Image (tube, helix red, strand yellow):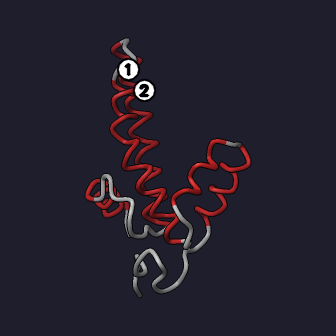
């Protein structure tokens, strides 16, 4: 999955917490989120307000959580594991899991997101 397809998938599945997301979808969405946040921050500095970055953050929060949940589903883990992000060790564990290839073939959360 390429950058554009991942962004389209993120917005098409804005609040869909079911299904699976491949590594490429998750990381391209994360890159998009980072780029948009940086641009919004720069615009906020230029115009002297802290409004745009907050709006962008709120607008991208739900789809980011949905993509992260689907990424965990690809690893055959429930989305409840996202709660461990509230700890430093949990953030490290989630980062490691986000780098691991998903389970091949179908699992309890659905078919393989990138069938070969």
Image quadrant assignment for residue 111: bottom left
Give the farthest residue toward the top: 48
Quadrant holding the N terminus: bottom left
Residue labelled with disc 2: 41
Q: In this image, 88 relative to 82: left or right? A: right
Mark 2 in CB contact with mark 1 (< 8 angstroms): yes
Expressed as whole percent of the image width and height from the top left, the position of residue 44 reads: 38, 20
Give the vertical position of 6 relative to 65 (above or below).
below
Residue in the image at 37% along x and 34% along y: 58
Residue in the image at 37% along x and 17% along y: 46
Residue labelled with disc 1: 44
34 and 17: which one is in front?
A: 17
Expressed as whole percent of the image width and height from the top left, the position of residue 69 reads: 47, 59
Residue in the image at 69% along x and 56% along y: 93
13 and 36: which one is in front?
A: 13
Expressed as whole percent of the image width and height from the top left, the position of residue 56 reads: 35, 34
Give the farthest residue toward the left: 12
Residue in the image at 49% along x and 64% along y: 71
Q: CA distance from mark 2 to mark 1?
A: 5 Å
Q: SS at mark 1?
A: helix
Q: Residues within 10 Å of mark 1 (few under 14, many from 20)?
A: some
Q: SS at mark 2?
A: helix
83 and 54: which one is in front?
A: 83
């Amino acid at each position: 999955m390429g950058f554009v397809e991942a962004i389209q998938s993120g917005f098409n599945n804005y609040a869909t917490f079911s299904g699976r997301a491949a590594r490429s979808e998750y990381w391209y969405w994360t890159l998009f989120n980072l780029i948009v946040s940086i641009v919004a921050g720069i615009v906020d500095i230029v115009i002297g307000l802290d409004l745009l970055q907050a709006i962008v953050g709120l607008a991208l929060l739900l789809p980011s959580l949905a993509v992260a949940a689907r990424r965990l589903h690809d690893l055959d883990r429930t989305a409840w594991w996202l709660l461990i992000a509230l700890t430093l060790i949990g953030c490290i564990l989630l980062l490691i899991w986000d780098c691991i290839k998903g389970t091949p073939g179908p699992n309890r959360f659905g078919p393989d997101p990138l069938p070969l």
